Amino acid sequence: MREDIVALIKEAGIVGAGGAGFPTHVKVSAPAEVVIVNGAECEPLLRVDQQLMQFEAAKVVKGLEAVMEATGASQGVIALKAKYKAAKEALTEEIKGRPVKLFTLGDFYPAGDEHVTVYEVVKRVVPEGGIPLKVNCVVSNVETLINIANALEGAPVTDSFLTVTGEVPKPITVKLPIGTSIAEALALAGLKDLAGKVVIEGGPMMGKVVADVGAPITKTTKGIIVLPEAHPLVQRKKLSLAHQLRRSKAACIQCSRCTDVCPRYMLGHRLQPHKIMCSLNYLRGDEQVVRMSLLCSECGACEYGCPMELSPRQVNAALKQELAQKGIKLESASQSPVPELTREYKKIPVKRLIIRMGLTRYDCPAPLTAVEFKPKKVTIPLQQHIGAPAEPTVDVGEWVEKGAEIARTKEGALGANIHASISGVITAITDCIVIETRDREAAKEC
């Protein structure tokens, strides 16, 4: 039965619904003691997981129990913030008589960092550079579990839930076919004119500015935020790496506040962003200090802590890339104990974070809304996940039904299968597969 569950998850093309999109069938193939549902959704303004836990509680629990069976876990824990009262009520009712319990988290950032979530729930520290399996835990996203529940019924991943919010007439959370353009998602929130506005894909902390609103949503798209182009957050995100490096060399005052609020440092990891920033002025001479960047989760908490408005996160991301290109890896070392007495006082309250970023006016409901939206065309990337891109199993001109496999993971490669999100004709295959809706008989004549 365990093998059957893993096989169904693989066939359905399920990846982590958010973040880097790690292929789920690989994650659940390993044995574990505890399966933790990451329901923190700590990125400000996003409203997907909290509503899915409320309205799809049965599927969340069904997916959780399937992962427990696949991994042999004896414990299942749904970790969600105490403020998600409606979700908590729905889940409390659903888990009655089941080997699953709820764990309530405080409203701090980044409670959804899986290292942080694991520590909060089971008080185990994931080793530096490691994954939760190192401490016999598997962490899964809420929507991922819903996709697993659907896979048990034979339904592959064809849609994604996302919040569209910010400077839009009607903030909403909606399920859309994968490959729908960002522009079409914005139109559903009532926004058609982007003059003077900028779009961020993802949350305000870790999201990135969108260069082309014609780009498609993917299996991992969870948020689209629109802000005025003059907004300080937008201006900050638009700063080039070269500019950030120049500012960092000149303006870092070595106050160490970035390190004080770093969630990985507070778990005893060696990551000390202020030391990395200092090393920039010494031609990166201390390689051991620079290697600390490999521990960075890029959550951006350091940006909140910096009084000079610098971005250790962006510096770390660049250094990680440089080290990877050189084949330099982290050297193992013993970790420091968790500073439990001070950790609680250094957590970043989400409300304060929202105020600091100037997003208070956008901190509003984005209700889950059922829409009858059928795009005329979808552009589905062959790589929506960590690992190798999937390989097309269809040809241009071929008719496909929604849910049909259109690309498959190469045997032995890390990846995920991809399925048609609408019915139509394959009109192009590059690094994406384009499907257009046409009358089936007319398509045959073409």
Image (tube, rainbow, N blue to C red):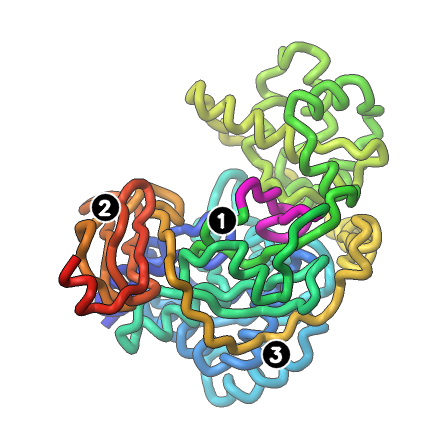
User: In the rendered structure, which amino acid carries the disc numbered 2?
Assistant: Glu
Q: Nearer the viewer, mark 2 or mark 1?
A: 1
Image position, residue 141 (x, y; %): 49, 62
What numbered label is drawn on residue 391?
Answer: 2
| In the displayed structure image, the side of residue 103 where residue 394 appears, left or right | left
28 lies above or below 198: below
Residue at the extreme left of the image, as rendered: 445
Are circles 3 and 2 on residues that touch, CB within 8 Å?
Answer: no
**Mark 2 vs 1, N-terminal side:** 1
Give SS at disc 1. loop
Image position, residue 387 (x, y; %): 35, 42
Give SS at disc 2. strand
**In whole angstroms, how far apart are the C-alphas of marks 3 and 1?**
34 Å
Image position, residue 251 (x, y; %): 82, 22
Which of 226/367 is in front?
226
Which of 153/257 is in front?
153
Q: Is residue 136 in sight in this rendering?
A: no
Give SS at disc 3. helix
User: In the rendered structure, which amino acid carries the disc numbered 3?
Assistant: Ala
Q: Is residue 263 in sight in this rendering?
A: yes
User: In the rendered structure, which amino acid carries the disc numbered 1?
Assistant: Gly
Which residues, given as a range, are shown in magenta?
197-212
